[in-house]
Every structure is written in structure tokens, then in C-alpha cells.
Image (tube, rainbow, N blue to C red):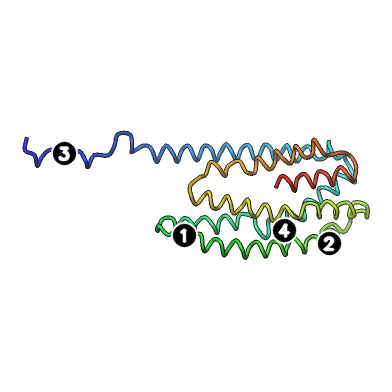
Amino acid sequence: MSRQNQPNQQDQPPSGSHGKPHHNLKLATMIAMFGLLLSKISGHLREILIVPILGYGVVSDSFIIGFQIPDLFYQLLVGGAIAAAVTPSLSHALEKKEEDRGWRSLSILINYIAVALLAAVLLGELLSPQLIALYNNSKAPEIEALAVRVSRALFPQVFFMMLAALSIGILNAYRQFGKTSFGPTIYNISFVLAMVLLGSKSDVGAVRVAAGVMGAA
């Protein structure tokens, strides 16, 4: 056989290289699905334990109402928007070999978001009584008063959850999907631990749980 007809060994792909990207994608998908499943289970456990630990009535009602206001702020101001904004822009910069430029743009975005959310958290702390009254104006005064204390203890978590959303967006841009899959589960487990260790059927117990949940964020 002439040399021209012989296959060029340099052009041959290395053994086993065809299946590696597909295998990595399958593994990342399985990890993400497992993380989502754990998140759902731990989230349901979190909700189930509120009434048994805090009691049925004033304390549990106040905690649930007080939790809803900061959570509403988070959903409106942060939600999945930050991760959705960070991942494509940073991924595009990485693909174009412009990582430094991507990080400069990201740094500016982080600064603006941090200032805006700090202002929102401060407003939430100051306006908690009005927000609670507007959101649940049919509740008894003692429920509203305790809900305000719970809400004020929880409001700082909006800022820390923004940092978590940024981290998720950055890790996704670097295709580190496995490292982002268990964040909600860790939060839910920390929430459950705060209730079990700090909760009681009293006003103080509800505020302690709220402070513990904020620390979990």
C-alpha cells in the first residue's frame, strides 16, 4: 500500500473521546435532577414542621405571614433573574476568550444590584408594619405585631440569597452544574435545623427560628 493511502494516525480521534461529552451531560443532568428531588422533599418537610413545632394559632400564623413578605421581595427583585442574566453574558465572554472583560462587566452589575437590594432591605425593615398590615389586614393585632418581628429578622436574607443567585449564575457559566444543584436543599435543611433547635410555641421561639433561617441563607 502506498504511503498516500495509509490513514494518518494524527487525524484519528483518541479512543473513547466520542462518548465523553455525552457522558458528562448525562451525569450533570442526573445530578441536577437528584438535587431538584432533594430540594422538593426537604421543602415539603420544612413546610410540614412549622405548625407542629411553633404550634397551631398565633405563633405559626405570625411566622408564616412574616416569612411571606421577605420571600415576596426576593421573588420580585431577585428570583431566577440574576442567574439568568449572569450566566449567558459570562458564558459568552468565556467562549470568546474574554474572561477578564466578562468579569469587569459582572463586577459593575454586582455593585448596582448590591446597592439596590441593600436599599430594598432597608425599606423592608422600616416599612414592615405597613407591609404586614397591607398584606394581611384581617389578622388580629397580636399576630401582626409578631409577624413584623419575624419579617424584620428575615429581611436581610434577601441580600444573602442574591449572593447565592449570583454564585449559581457564575458556576453555571463555568459549567459547574453539580455544585449548584444542592443549594436549595442545604437552605431547606438549615431551615429545618433552625426550627428543631430554636423553635418553640412562643413569640421568642418564632423570632429565634427567623434569625436561624436568616443565618441559613
Q: Which residue is mark 2?
A: 134
Q: Which residue is mark 1?
A: 100
Q: Is residue 67 left or right of residue 96?
A: right
Decide which of tag 1 and tag 2 comes sooner along the chain. 1
**Marks 3 and 2, how far apart at CA:** 77 Å
Decide which of tag 3 and tag 2 comes sooner along the chain. 3
**Residue located at (82% from left, 63% from top):** 126
Q: Is residue 13 left or right of residue 146?
A: left
Residue type, numbered disc 3 = Pro
Could you say where residue 57 lies in the image, as x and y percent from the top left? 89, 43
Residue type, numbered disc 4 = Phe
Q: Residue furthest right?
A: 141
Crowd rating for badge 4 (residues with CA inside 10 Å; few <14, some 14–19, many 20+): some
Q: Which residue is mark 3?
A: 7
**Marks 1 and 4, how far apart at CA:** 32 Å
Q: Nearer the viewer, mark 1 or mark 4?
A: 1
Q: Which residue is mark 4?
A: 73
Dot 2: element: helix
**In the depicted structure, whether residue 217 falls above or below residue 74:** above
Could you say where residue 102 lies in the image, as x and y percent from the top left? 48, 60
Q: Nearer the viewer, mark 1 or mark 3?
A: 1
Decide which of tag 1 and tag 4 comes sooner along the chain. 4
